[in-house]
Amino acid sequence: MRIACLLDSDFEDSEFRKPYDRFTSAGHELTVIGLEAGKELKGKKGQETARAEKGISEVSADGFDALFIPGGYSPDHLRADQRMVDFTRAFFQRERPVFAVCHGPQLLITAEVVKGRTMTAWQTVQRDLAIAGAKVVDREVVVDRSLVTSRKPDDLDAFIRESLAVLQRTGVAAR
């Protein structure tokens, strides 16, 4: 399956790298999408660097089967751009899998897609989710239909396991 990874600078290094590697090793194709193509993006801990393969103006949600949003400061940067917000919302409108870890749900709040969903996130984001109408639980991973959320780097194994299970269960045909 084709997975869009929305990313900007100051992402949480492990929350990008570990799922990225596991998704690709499972045979999925990930495309790093940033605000502009070719931009070098650095993790907040300086351990990882990624390059935006595509800019948001070059892509459509129709070209992807799932969406992956790592945490760190990246989601807060991305939600300031309406194109990123619209791209994110489109996955919910099309009922496609979305995987958001740590601060990733900040982008979902801005896209106004969390109301009525059972979710988790980083401790400080949990209150924002509740205010936006989500049912918040403090667990390592939460699956609500095709939405998978986790709290922090320590939860990545569970996050990846459940994300891969959703991809297998949904069986969305690759383009």
Image (tube, helix red, strand yellow):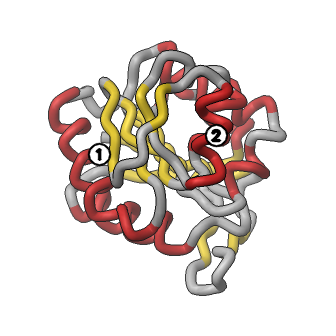
Q: Which marked residue is nearer to the observer: mark 2 or mark 1?
A: 2
Callout count: 2
Q: Is residue 44 above or below residue 105?
A: below
Q: Quadrant for the C terminus, please.
A: top left
Outermost residue, right side: 80
- Amino acid type at circle 1 is Ser
Mark 1 falls on what kind of element?
A: helix
Q: Is residue 155 left or right of residue 72?
A: left
Q: Is residue 146 left or right of residue 91?
A: left
Depth check, front residue: 29 or 111: 111
- Amino acid type at circle 2 is Arg
Q: Position of residue 137 (x, y in %)?
A: 42, 39
User: Within the image, what quadrant is residue 94 found in?
Assistant: top left
Q: Is residue 71 left or right of residue 23?
A: right
Q: Position of residue 57 (x, y in %)?
A: 74, 36
Outermost residue, bottom side: 47
Residue shown at the point (54%, 27%) measured from the top left: 61
Residue shown at the point (40%, 36%) measured from the top left: 66
Q: Position of residue 126 (x, y in %)?
A: 58, 43
Q: Which residue is mark 1?
A: 163
- Sequence-wise, the earlier of marks 2 and 1 is 2
Disc ID at residue 127: 2
Q: Quadrant for the N terminus, please.
A: top left
Depth check, front residue: 141 or 51: 141
**Quick one: label 1, few (<14), some, or many (20+) residues within 10 Å?**
many
Q: Position of residue 169 (x, y in %)?
A: 16, 31
**Quick one: label 2, few (<14), some, or many (20+) residues within 10 Å?**
some
Mark 2 falls on what kind of element?
A: helix
